[in-house]
Amino acid sequence: MKAFLIATSALLISGCKDQETVTTYTIQKEERKAVPPTPVAGDAAAGAAQPGDGGTMNALPGMVEQSQQFGAPTFTAPEHWQAQPLGNMRKGSWQIAQDDLTADMSVLVFPGDVGGDLANINRWRQQVGLPAIDAATLAKELTAIPVGAYEGQFITLINPDTGQGIIGAILAKDGATWFFKMIGPAPLVIQEMTAFKQFLAATEF
């Protein structure tokens, strides 16, 4: 009997030791990388550069919906401007064609200042192959221009090397920024200068 108890005790002690054995493992912590917001395709550039153009600026999620809350002004476009389908953020869209030259005219609105005039004008400059400028230079190139009953800022960008040009106006109004931009071959863009300014003056918000 005594031998039996000793044997049983030995088994219990051995079993407890087996249960107390702990195996440890080292698991590497999973590295999580920040995922940037997914850009929205379409008329997202300030001035709506089309696919393939340089200087595009994609709209962040929600910006399209915010822009759609702004109603379109009343436009009086020249007869030779051919109306085009509107994009996600375009409030107005026309094509100007003469002989073998074609220019694109767009009106867009974005909530806020979309980075400010300097960033937006430098995007336009990139689209026609011009280098970026600083704020002091921009101040010399912008001129006041009537946009309906409001005052906007007008600029002309011509690149003699690429033969491309932009005439554009920027208007800050009611917490949004409006962009009026014509881009195309420099001779056609310059030729449309008067029509462009008349279009701005006749715009009614």
Image: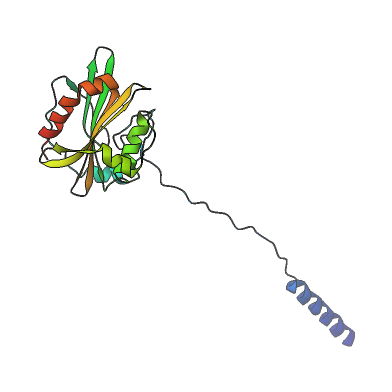
Residue situated furthest top in the rendering: 99
For the point 27% across and 42% down, the residue is 139
Is residue 34 depicted above or below 164 in this figure? below
Question: In terms of depth relative to the viewer, which is nearer, 105 or 68?
Answer: 105
Rendering quarter of residue 101 = top left
Give coordinates of residue 122: x percent, y percent.
35, 37
For the point 16% across and 30% down, the residue is 197
Give coordinates of residue 128: x percent, y percent.
35, 28
Give coordinates of residue 107: x percent, y percent.
22, 34
Q: Quadrant of the C terminus?
A: top left
Give the image's coloring scheme.
rainbow
Is residue 3 depicted above or below 25 in this figure? below
Give coordinates of residue 104: x percent, y percent.
26, 25
- Is residue 70 visible from the viewing direction of this image? yes
Q: Quadrant of the N terminus?
A: bottom right
Is residue 74 depicted above or below 37 in this figure? above
Rendering quarter of residue 56 = top left
